[in-house]
Image (spheres, rainbow, N blue to C red):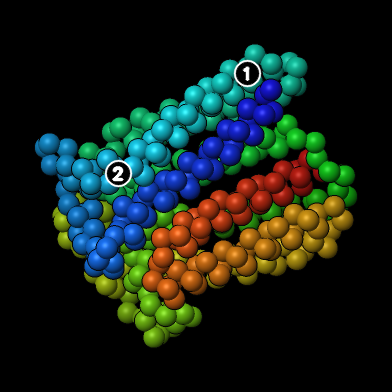
Amino acid sequence: MYQKLVLATCVLAFCAVVLSAYARLADAGLGCANWPACYEENTLKERQPPQADGTGHGAGRGHTSWQWKLHSQVVQLLGLLAIAVCGLAWKNRNALRQSPLLPTLLLVLIVFMAAFGIWAFAHLPRPVIVLVHLAGGVAMLMLLAWIALRQIAQPAAIDADVAQKWRGLSWLGVVLLLIQIMLGGWVSSNFAALACTGFPLCNGALLPPMDFSYSIDRSGLALSAERLTAIHWMHRVGALLVVVYLGWLSFGVMAAKGLRNIGKAILGLVVFQAALGISNVLFGLPLLVAVLHNATAMLLLVALVALSFRLRNA
């Protein structure tokens, strides 16, 4: 019962993160009739300061759409399941022979995210809200993946020397991917996805004109082209670093006995994710491709967490 509940909650957390990305991207105008003009219009709308009546930051526009309503319902269900997981973890802690600390942290995180969401939309700019919600969703998914892995019978044991060799390198891959996911959220929340045209060059240059200064304010002024280019360019550089590192890590892991399948899975996800990122640039950010780009990043993160779990328990 507990194992099935944890697995269902983990799948629902993945759906919640992907739905959040879909709602955010649809709200950005990726599916509007006058694309890409509406994408640029929404850049200005989202930087407007909140008004006394609660409008501003797209509150009246984006968060009443069916995408956000569906996301809200999924998150509410996720909260109920998290309460059940936490309750069963405490009730059956002796039978499970596991500490209920992680389920408790999961529930605390969900309560914090709910409180933050109620307060933030009237007080904080979109980029900050997006990054905090993205970080919270990713943290919930990682916690649930780890809790689920504790309930699943693991394959054959791994050699201790091999585990020691790759354990730290695996966690470094998790950290690099987390940074890259946050950079992706920064690009999305600042409407910088189309700031660089062409691939592999950005606007025809390896180092285009960029401005790395940034001010989190609500002046209603759009970011300059140079600032948007800098945000997008940093995400590209991060992507190159992550692809190279995770590609090297996956080949190394595949050579280790008992880790070949998970190494193949990581390599396949890395290649697919890179192809999706390039397609976003070359085809003008199609909504489906952009959502898949977010979903694949979450799957890759879960795969790396699974690798780290196996190496930790070798």
Q: What is the C-alpha distance between the residues marked 1 and 2?
A: 35 Å
Q: Which quarter of the rendered picture does the N terminus lie within? A: top right
Local packing at callout 2 (Cα closer than 10 Å; few below 14, some 14-19, many 20+) is: few
**Numbered mark located on residue 88 in the image:** 1
Tell me: 4 left or right of 287: right
The answer to whether any part of residue 14 appears in the image is yes
Q: Residue at x 28, y 66 (%)?
A: 35
Tell me: 14 left or right of 254: left
Which residue in the protein does label 2 denote?
65
Q: Residue at x 43, y 29 (%)?
A: 76
The answer to whether any part of residue 183 appears in the image is no
Mark 1 or mark 2, which has the lower sequence index? Answer: 2
Closer to us: 129 or 6: 6
Closer to us: 209 or 59: 59
Question: Looking at the rendering, which quadrant does residue 14 occupy?
Answer: top right
Closer to us: 272 or 266: 272
- The answer to whether residue 107 is above or below residue 177 is above
At mark 1, the secondary structure is: helix
Tell me: 110 left or right of 33: right
Which residue is outermost to the front?
33
